Amino acid sequence: MQEDNMGFQYINNLPSPEEIKEQFPLPAESAARKAERDQAISDVLTGKSDKFLVIVGPCSADNEDSVSDYANRLIKVQEQTKDRLIIIPRIYTNKPRTTGEGYKGMLHQPDPEKKPDLREGLIAIRKMHMKVLIETGLSTADEMLYPENLGYLDDIMSYIAIGARSVENQQHRLTASACDVAVGMKNPTSGDLSVMLNSVVAAQHPHDFTYRGWEVRSKGNPLAHTILRGAVNKHGQCIPNYHFEDLFLLHEMYSERDLENPACIVDANHSNSNKKYNEQIRISKEVLHSRKHSPEIRALVKGLMIESYIEPGSQKVGEHCYGKSITDPCLGWEDSERLIYEIAENA
């Protein structure tokens, strides 16, 4: 173990994305399927398709078996709703922590009850994302918490989210500008919509910057868009931003900027629901009602993000309830399945 002048202790020399991809290559058939899905999602965001996106899955993907089980349940629903919906499994393997404490996701801890092991974590997250794509044909979504790790999963994911705590970060914005898939920028925890839109502006333009020890140049990402996830005021109270007035305000703010492909996804959980996971059902229905009421909102709102797992609620690490979240509480499968069908009927 080495230590430098900054106080870092160098524990392991991690494999590069190229080494991991060589060790765990994506089959050609799955790569072709991902390309099809990338185009279908792009068509929604650019307005070429009137299908609706549903990004759905657990708050944090903590167990390969239960995540695979969940995704295999999703594929049956996707087949029944394929004329109206594009379902994207939410396979979140990096968990941002407000205080830095607690479970940080499979990348850090492949086994939530053991010590961090990022070498094994990089392998575990690639294998899990790959397993979902190979078994179900559904390419995945994850949060880009660490921009330098994008290369470990970029050939599998069709959707990338930039979180509320990262959306003002320069490296996240510039890395998003180099992505060739949809990247959603969440509003910051303060709720300032202009910050979120500034991130979209940055991501849609080309840049020169440093990345993994290289000077690189990006071409800009026309599929960068917004995600409304609610806010928290100075008193720590949650303030939702999914109501009709919020959506129309975002439409007006988009119209004042020269941005490609104005689009928004509404996150039905987090500060929009005050983490009351069952409220996601009501919130999703309200968003769909707003789309029916206003052609401007219908053109803007392209999808919903929903936290869902096999069992409802959440548990502490070590309780071992199969398919139940060990981070934020989620909708259970039965309610989720019912909700997705209702979304298909009303989107």
Image (tube, helix red, strand yellow):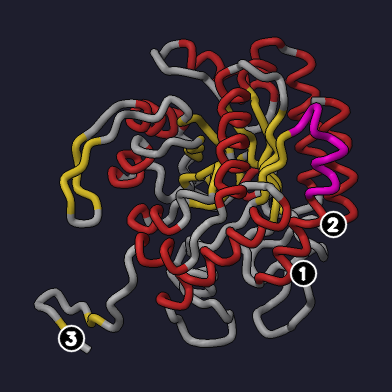
Circle 3 packing at 10 Å, graded few (<14), some (14-19), many (20+), is: few
Q: In this view, does 203 lie to the left or right of 262?
A: left
Residue 2: image tag? 3
Residue found at x 28% / y 43% = 170
| Mark 2 residue type | Trp
SS of the residue under disc 1: loop
Q: Is residue 325 visible?
A: yes
Residue found at x 79% / y 27% = 84
Is residue 175 part of the magenta span, yes or no? no
| Horizontal and vertical percent position of residue 334 | 90, 54
Image marks 2 and 1: residues in contact by CB distance under 8 Å: yes
Quarter assignment of residue 256: top left
Front in this rendered view, residue 260 or 266 = 260
SS of the residue under disc 3: strand
Quarter assignment of residue 19: bottom left
Mark toward the start of the polypeptide (3 vs 2)? 3
Mark toward the start of the polypeptide (1 vs 3)? 3
Residue receiving disc 2: 333
Outermost residue, left side: 5
Q: Distance between the residues labelled 3 and 2?
A: 47 Å
Residue 323: image tag? 1
Residue 234: image tag? none
Quadrant of the frame with the N terminus: bottom left
